[in-house]
């Protein structure tokens, strides 16, 4: 639960200040370092701070999501009914099919995705009819190949 609170704090700082700390060392660790740094840097540290619009738009929701799931998992390990309360809140008080489940041995599962995948697949597989005159990239009818080879 403490790790979740730390990620909530990182999300709030990312939104309010638009900055986040990162480790300016070995590149593969630099990429994941914003998720590993939870304490303020020391005096002669390789931890630097970066800012930009991508931090509140990309990193703040990521920090919030990771914090949410860490907090839920911590509450479940502590014996609190966090996933049940979350399902009740997300479903508007309706009792029935859960949106989210948690098992202490296997972690989180998302039954909502399994139930909605056939409908989403059907929506994604439908073709959209576009007027040929309004296409940004015309279909290859051989004229492009002729223009390239001339």
Image: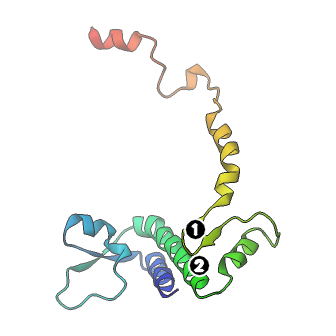
**Picture quarter with the C terminus:** top left
Residue at the limit of the structure toward the left, as seen here: 44
Q: Quadrant of residue 54?
A: bottom left
Residue beneath the point at 73% across and 66% down: 98
**134 relative to 44, above or below:** above
Residue 85 located left or right of residue 51: right
* Near-viewer residue (136 or 36): 36
Q: Is residue 149 above or below residue 105?
A: above
Q: Which mark is residue 108?
A: 1
Residue 102 placement (x, y as % from top left): 61, 71
What residue do we see at 53% from left, 26% from top? 135
Nearest to viewer (mark 2 / mark 1): 1
Q: Which residue is mark 2?
A: 72
Q: Position of residue 12 (x, y in %)?
A: 49, 80
Relative to 46, 132 lies left or right: right
Q: Badge 1: how crowded within 10 Å, few (<14), some, or many (20+)? A: some
8 left or right of 149 in image: right
User: SS at mark 1?
Assistant: strand
In the displayed orientation, state which residue is furthest to the front: 105
- Percent across and percent down for residue 120 are 66, 44
Is disc 2 in contact with disc 1, using a CB cutoff of under 8 Å? yes
Q: Foreground: 132 or 39?
A: 39
Residue drawn where x is 52% and y is 86% of the image:
1
């Amino acid at each position: 639960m403490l790790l979740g609170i730390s990620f909530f704090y990182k999300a709030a700082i990312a939104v309010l200040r638009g900055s986040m700390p990162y480790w300016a060392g070995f590149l593969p660790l630099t990429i994941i370092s914003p998720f590993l740094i939870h304490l303020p840097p020391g005096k002669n540290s390789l931890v630097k701070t970066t800012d930009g619009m991508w931090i509140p738009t990309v990193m703040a929701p990521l920090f919030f999501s990771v914090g949410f799931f860490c907090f839920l998992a911590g509450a479940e390990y502590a014996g609190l009914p966090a996933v049940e309360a979350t399902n009740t809140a997300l479903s508007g008080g309706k009792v029935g099919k859960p949106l989210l489940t948690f098992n202490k041995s296997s972690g989180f599962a998302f039954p909502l995705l399994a139930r909605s995948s056939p409908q989403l697949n059907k929506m994604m597989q439908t073709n959209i009819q576009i007027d040929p005159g309004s296409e940004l990239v015309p279909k290859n009818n051989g004229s492009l190949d002729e223009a390239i080879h001339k």
